[in-house]
Amino acid sequence: MKSLEERILSEGIVKDGEILRVDSFLNHQMDPAMFREMAKEWYREFADAGVNKILTIEASGIGLAVVAAEEFGCRAVFAKKVSGRNMDTDVYATKITSFTKGKVYDVVVSKRFLNPGDRVLIVDDFLANGCALDGLMDLVRQAGATLVGCGIAIEKGFQGGGTRIRAQGVRVHSLAIIESMDGDQIAFCEE
Amino acid sequence: MKSLEERILSEGIVKDGEILRVDSFLNHQMDPAMFREMAKEWYREFADAGVNKILTIEASGIGLAVVAAEEFGCRAVFAKKVSGRNMDTDVYATKITSFTKGKVYDVVVSKRFLNPGDRVLIVDDFLANGCALDGLMDLVRQAGATLVGCGIAIEKGFQGGGTRIRAQGVRVHSLAIIESMDGDQIAFCEE
């Protein structure tokens, strides 16, 4: 998506050659006009897929998921990070490793909000090594729901998660795919 | 807001006489059509106030804040809960006590996203004792920005936070105010 790539070039900050900060419009400050454009793009890609639920993970996926759900005319659900002791029994649970934070999270979704009949589009802001997607796909599987695909804002192509997950036959649509971040030089590639 | 009150009555679950669970449409599963209606209502109330930024706190305020920001034609920012060791230096920071979770959070907003010229509407899903609002208002004050008011989805009137904050001269607009939760009986009152 040209406008997203331009936005990344003009506002993104590369840190330590690995981290891309886009907190001026995506995951701290949020630009709803850009979110709307992104959601429309996911809708164009998955309009034929009968999506009836958007699934994401807190916190930075939530805004994107709500706007996407509005485009698809369905509801959004966000998986919650919990500490073990607060764990409900009526949830699907999985573990997600965050490399940026050096932490393993227990992540849950209430069984009331993911059902065998659901056709789920997973939405998230970043796809790097794919750990978050692995966890969210595991929740969809546990619920017996159908995974329609994944709508991603920014994929770090050089970290391999997207390649690995597409190889499993999952339809992943990333709006911007970064091929390399060399110093401050960000290069994009096609899907 | 009649439709929100009806939704609370039909889907809300009262737990231990104090906790109201509305996770089927507000803060775990999210209904974007209801969010849109709520955002339009906040816009009607604050249309004259020159709002140019929506501020909320992760996680459950984020979806509401993005939809509200779209109505106001501005950006939304969410304050982040951080553990002390990750604290950046370029942030405004405050502490927020969560009684439901029995925890004190360090909460931050990057200094880049709250400015002296900003006219800020705080948006959140719940107002109970008002601790979250106190913290968010403190961040607005630290930034030297102007607090226009607070748009709340559900206020638990019997917990006193709204009364206390309105007494400080802050314009608080809650879309549903619960006067009492007696067993499963939920009663609403006017602002």
Image: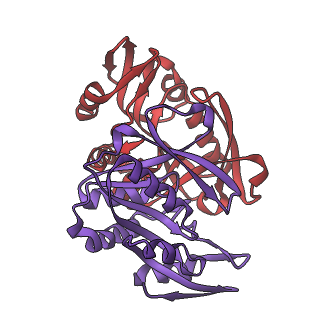
Chain colours: A purple, B red
Find residue A70 and report its horizontal and vertical position in percent: 28, 57
| Residue drawn at the location 76% of the way across and 47% of the way down | B84
**Quadrant containing the N terminus of chain B in the rendered view:** top left
Name the spot of residue B114 as percent of width and height, x first: 60, 57
Q: Nearer the viewer, residue A120 or B83?
A: A120
Between A72 and A137, the residue placed more toward the observer is A137
Relative to A66, is A118 on the left or the right? left
- Residue B59, given in percent of the width and then of the height, sits at 51, 46
Residue for point 31% across, 43% down? B38
**Does residue B77 show up?**
yes
Q: Residue furthest top?
A: B182
Residue toward you, B114 or A37: A37
Q: Quadrant of residue B131?
A: top right
Q: How many marks?
A: 0
Q: Quadrant of the C terminus of chain B?
A: top left
Query: Looking at the picture, does residue A93 appear above or below residue B110?
Result: above
Residue A62 seen in render: no
Residue positioned 55% across, 34% down in the render: A87
Q: Is residue B69 left or right of residue B143?
A: left
Q: Locate residue B132: give its quadrant.
A: top right
Instruction: Report x, y in % for residue B64.
Output: 40, 48
Q: Residue at x 51, y 53 (%)?
A: B119
